[in-house]
Amino acid sequence: MSFTLVTFHAHPDDEAIATGGIMARAAAEGNRVVLVVATRGELGEVDEGVLSPGKTLGDRRVLETRLAAEALGVARVEFLGYTDSGMAGEATNDADGSFWSADLDEAAARLAAILDEEDADVLTVYDDHGGYGHPDHVQVHRVGVLAGALAGTPRVYEATLNRDHIKRLMAARPDGLGDGIDAPDPSAFDSMGSTESQITTTVDVGDFVDQKRAAMRAHASQISDSSFFLSMPDDAFREAFGWEWFIRRGELPKAPETSVFDGLDAG
């Protein structure tokens, strides 16, 4: 049996970090994987000299998204056409065309049309606080949940961070995650992601961390080789990014799930 997985994200590179593992695993197992991105990430920070003459950051990030998608085995990439809203509290949140200021019904209809075209079995969005409160991430939750309902998508999952797992990892590596990488204060995760008790679905993507890291590397305008993500030793990266966590919406599973396809019947 094969399924269609649609993952919905706010900006280029979010997909690699949050759901790159399940995307690669789903594709390797013969499923169709579709990536939908709300914005082109026009307001991301970029070092001088990274952009080619005449190229905008949005142009560059679209190209990076397609390269990352190729690394993950994604069959289709779509952008909803909204602009990056910037961090919480910035004036760009309310700018014309920003994702945060988008009409909820209109944005959900755009996504629902793709879900209908694909006859999607599973949709991933973000948890209700967008992981860490970024306006576009919160809007992914709001738009995605409504779109899933409009399209009648059988399963909708909220991608989240297991804050308890991360805190255990920090405690087990008090000297940091590798040379020159200091371990963050565990309290920094108190308001990020979700507690372990809230999570319904924990997916082991350890066999796909190389693809996940390659997808991160494809987003070179945002994730440099010296970044936290790419400078970690392999074992630390596997511990930190070899699992992906989700909260299943609607009817809860009777037992903890190990796949977003658990118990689904192929259409």
Image (cartoon, helix red, strand yellow):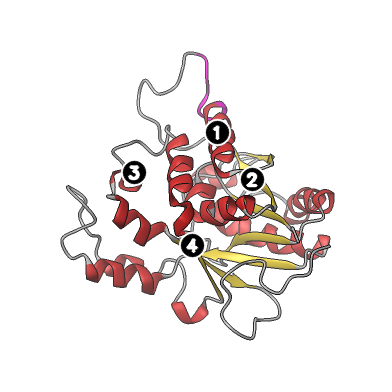
Quick one: SS at disc 2? strand
Mark 4, residue position: 131
- Side of 172 where 77 appears, left or right: right
Magenta segment: does it hold 216?
no
Mark 1, residue position: 67
Cα gap from disc 1 to disc 3, whole angstroms: 17 Å
Q: Earlier in the sequence, mark 3 or mark 4?
A: 4
Cα gap from disc 3 to disc 2, whole angstroms: 25 Å
Label 3 crowd bin: few (<14), some (14–19), many (20+), radius 10 Å: some
- Of 98 and 32, the residue lying toward us: 32
Mark 3, residue position: 230
Cα gap from disc 4 to disc 1, whole angstroms: 25 Å
Quick one: SS at disc 3? helix
The answer to whether mark 2 and mark 1 are in CB contact below 8 A is no
Q: Position of residue 146 (x, y in %)?
A: 74, 63
Q: Residue at x 80, y 52 (%)?
A: 109
Q: Is residue 66 above or below residue 6?
A: above
- Side of 131 where 149 appears, left or right: right
Label 4 crowd bin: few (<14), some (14–19), many (20+), radius 10 Å: many
- Of 214 and 88, the residue lying toward us: 214
Residue range corresponding to the magenta coloring = 54-59
Quick one: SS at disc 1? helix
Q: Earlier in the sequence, mark 4 or mark 1?
A: 1
Quick one: SS at disc 4? loop
Q: Position of residue 14 (x, y in %)?
A: 51, 48
The answer to whether mark 1 and mark 3 are in CB contact below 8 A is no
Mark 2, residue position: 38
Q: Residue at x 34, y 54 (%)?
A: 237
